[in-house]
Image (spheres, grey):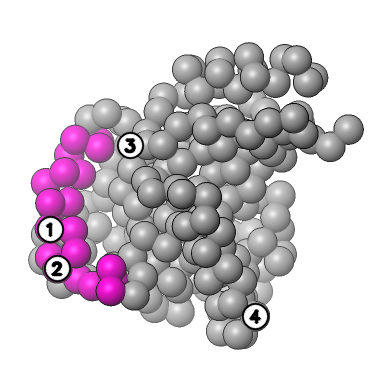
Amino acid sequence: MKLPSILYIYDPLCFWCYGFGPTLQKLFESLHDKVHFEILSGGMYIGNQAGTVSQVSPYLKTAYKEIERQTGVPFGEKFVKHILEPGTAILNSEKPSIALTTFKSYQPENIVKFAHHLQEAFFYDGKDLTDDATYIPLAKLFGIDGEEFVKKMHHPDYTRKTKEEFKIVNELGASGFPTILLLTEKQNYLLTRGYIEFEPLYLTINQLLSPVS
């Protein structure tokens, strides 16, 4: 029997997705033996939606504190001081989303870990995700040659695949991030659209899986 799938729709630049990262990792550790995990990038800041922090999401300069309070996940001082408060950093989801797509060609089984490391590089370490150099150490964390990884990111195939993901997410109607779906042979379930804590999410998934396990 084909394993059910958890489809996690996120964006590398989504603040709430960063706060949800440890919960997703805990979910993966608890369920990876009976559920397949897949991540799609949502394209939160692309096209006309991309721009500086001050242009596209000025409210985030203070809203991050509420995210910290609810999730318990801290935003790094370098991110707050050098990216958030000045407001001049560019929010563009395309390159980090291409990095995620590229990583899938190497180690799809580690996609949950990579997705979180990608967000930590931005939201905690304050790294520039528009800079190719940011991705070299991220790739090396997984034993991947960093220069080769970046070169692969620039191949047109991965831009195309990433834009296809954006299109799929749009067709699914995932208007908020994070969005989590449980896909089974019999039915698909919307588990959450927005942040949720581990315990109720884990309980819901187990209840839905019990008839098919």
Disc 4 is placed on an element classified as: helix
- CB under 8 Å between discs 2 and 1: yes
Q: Residue 98 appears at what percent x and percent y?
A: 53, 71
Q: Report if residue 115 is visible in the image.
A: no
Q: Is residue 67 above or below residue 93?
A: above
Amino acid beneath label 1: Pro
Residues at marks 2 and 1, CA–CA distance in whole angstroms: 6 Å
* Figure quadrant of the N terminus: top right
Q: Residue at x 39, y 78 (%)?
A: 131
* Nearer-the-camera pick, 193 or 197: 193
Amino acid beneath label 2: Gln
Q: Residue at x 31, y 30 (%)?
A: 72
Q: Report if residue 97 is visible in the image.
A: yes
* Nearer-the-camera pick, 61 or 117: 61
Q: Indicate the quadrant where residue 55 lies.
A: bottom left
Disc 3 is placed on an element classified as: loop
* Nearer-the-camera pick, 145 or 34: 34
Compare marks 1 and 3 and give the one earlier in the sequence.
1
Compare marks 4 and 2 and give the one earlier in the sequence.
2
**Residue 34 part of the magenta-drawn span:** no
- CB under 8 Å between discs 4 and 2: no
Q: Is residue 128 above or below residue 198?
A: below
- CB under 8 Å between discs 2 and 3: no
Disc 2 is placed on an element classified as: helix
Q: Which mark is residue 55?
A: 2
Disc 1 is placed on an element classified as: loop
Amino acid beneath label 4: Asp
Name the dominant secondary structure of the magenta segment.
Answer: helix
Q: Which residue is mark 4?
A: 157
